[in-house]
Amino acid sequence: MLQQIKWLWENMDAPRHKRHILALIISVVTSLMLLVNPALTQRLIDDVIMAQNPEPLLGILAVMLVAKLGREGMRYYMVVTLEKNAQNVVYNLRCKLFRRLQYNDMSFFDRHRAGDLMTRLSADLDWCRHFVSFIDYRIIDSACTFLFTSIYLFWVNWKLTALLIVVVPALMLITKLYSSHVRPRFMAMRDRLSEMNAAAQENIAGNRVIKAFAREEYEKEQFDKRNAAFMNSQLHINKLWLSFYPFIELLANAMMLITVFVGGLFIIQGEITPGQLAVFTGLSWALSNPMRDLGNLLNDLQRFSTSASKVQELYYLGPRIVDAPDAVDHDRMKGKIEFRHVSFKFDSKTVIDDVSFTVQPGQTVAIMGPTGGGKTTLINLLSRFYDVTSGEILVDDVNVKDWKLQQLRGGIGTATQDVFLFSDTVEGNVAFGDQDLSLEEVQDFAVRAAADEFVRKLPEGYDTIIGERGVGLSGGQRQRIALARALAVRPSILVMDDTTSAVDSETERYMQQQLRQLPFECTKFIIAQRVSSMRDADLILVLRDGRIVERGTHEELVKQRGYYYQTYALQNDLPTEEAI
């Protein structure tokens, strides 16, 4: 936990460190100031009331008022300062965590669910804020209050104070037992919260699929189970606390009983004055309250530690795919690509197996094959979303590992079948990769992607706000906007992963014609199952189980009478012998 506190301190802006220390010092001072009014109360009873001497009355009351107002004013400054510092820490952490998310590898997102990541950025971070703004000063406050009160009461009457303090060891034992039991339960509760948030996020994102299959009741039941699991984990913690709380409360109340009973005997015996008994009565809460707070503070500390460990896991988890130390700047890509005996394993499963081919600048390569054959993975390796297990990939005769990631990926435009559009205008989505594009340029790329016509029919044209993930647009419309977005960066390498799967044949032919007339040279990768999308390609690759089983032009592959030939024959409704 000390390491976690140090980590929070390091994420606080340096100018705030002194103010935070000052706020904690104020907590110590105001804890000491708690003794002022009880001490003056003793004088008020013994020197004014019992002595029948009203002369010091106004002076004592004035000092008590000033002490009270001064203490409250100092604590106001302390609370405001701590809250500002806490918000500063959370702001810095959230910025750094979001940066980690932006630059982490694809494999990171393969392993972590969106709902879990959102929990870390919200609920877990809030517990970090709660520690800086509340838990740390409450620990100091409780400890100092107990210590200063004990010292003062020992000075007033050590015998009665010793009787009050004797319950502390029993309390510490109970607290230690509670602490050892509660931490694993907090870990379990945090996991249940993450599962519930992940289920909610997936349900919201996939609401159209759920409605399409009429699975609302099933999803409701599944969420109810996760919600119940989270509720039960919280109840288990509360039950654990309630099983210890009566003993803590009993020990705390025992102090008051000891004060009244023993204090009364001491007055009878003349060992203390009525004013001194009033001090003990007034300050017994200052001994018992820290004991009561101890359990709650332990609860909060355990929650903070559990949440902070989850945040730190994300904070320290950097990307494995980074720029090489000797990576150098490159001019604009020419678009030459070479795969040399490339293999890739995902965990222990071989996805790409000894793939080799070369593409010259400006050529078009088409990739087809059965589902799960490794087509998309092959392209992901080109962009270094994953690194090859063996072999090498060269772009312009330079290994992709020697390119700077920003330049490598900036030279590759990608349009996929599973289109993600942002909640922005059509213009904003098309210009996503180049914010300096003019409206005329955006429209030009939309024309080339066969999107301009339907965009102009939208309520506000290019200023129309697209719903999350393109809600309100058809699949083909989303694909065309995605293609326009890919073209808008004027890529040296254009990747189209089933980009025309949701458009009609006429639109597909128009898009192919436009792609042949681009105002910049561009090497194209086309992943598709339609032969019509790839028959004009310079090189066609057929992938099966991660290996290239066929390669060549359309005419060459038809003659081979393999997978490509069978697909061509089926799509053109031709007898096998007439397929060519």
Image (cartoon, rainbow, N blue to C red):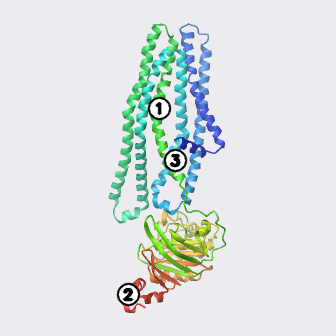
* Residue at x-position 60% and y-position 45%: 10
Up-down: is 548 above or below 556?
A: above
Please name which of the two marks, 1 or 2, marks the residue nearer to the observer: 1
* Residue at x-position 52% and y-position 49%: 312
* Residue at x-position 55% and y-position 39%: 133
Up-down: is 287 above or below 454?
A: above
Query: Badge 3 local density, few (<14 within 10 Å), some, or many (20+)?
Result: many
Instruction: Quadrant for residue 408, please give it.
Output: bottom right
Would residue 308 appear left or right of 77 to someone viewing this image? left
Up-down: is 279 above or below 483?
A: above
Between 205 and 114, which is closer to the camera in this rendering? 114
Name the residue tied to disc 1: 293
Would residue 160 appear left or right of 574 to someone viewing this image? right
At mark 2, the secondary structure is: loop
Between 214 and 408, which is closer to the camera in this rendering? 408
At mark 1, the secondary structure is: helix
Residue 538: x %, y % from top left:
53, 84
Nearest to N terminus: mark 3 or mark 1: 3
Say the numbered circle drawn on residue 573: 2
Query: Badge 1 local density, few (<14 within 10 Å), some, or many (20+)?
Result: some
Name the residue tied to disc 3: 125
Mark 2 belongs to which amino acid?
Asp
Instruction: Quadrant for residue 254, please give it.
Output: top left
Q: CA distance from mark 1 to mark 2?
A: 79 Å
Q: CA distance from mark 3 to mark 1?
A: 23 Å
Nearest to N terminus: mark 3 or mark 2: 3
Residue 319: x %, y % from top left:
55, 59
* Residue at x-position 53% and y-position 67%: 387
Mark 3 belongs to which amino acid?
Leu
Query: Badge 2 local density, few (<14 within 10 Å), some, or many (20+)?
Result: few
Between 316 and 435, which is closer to the camera in this rendering? 316
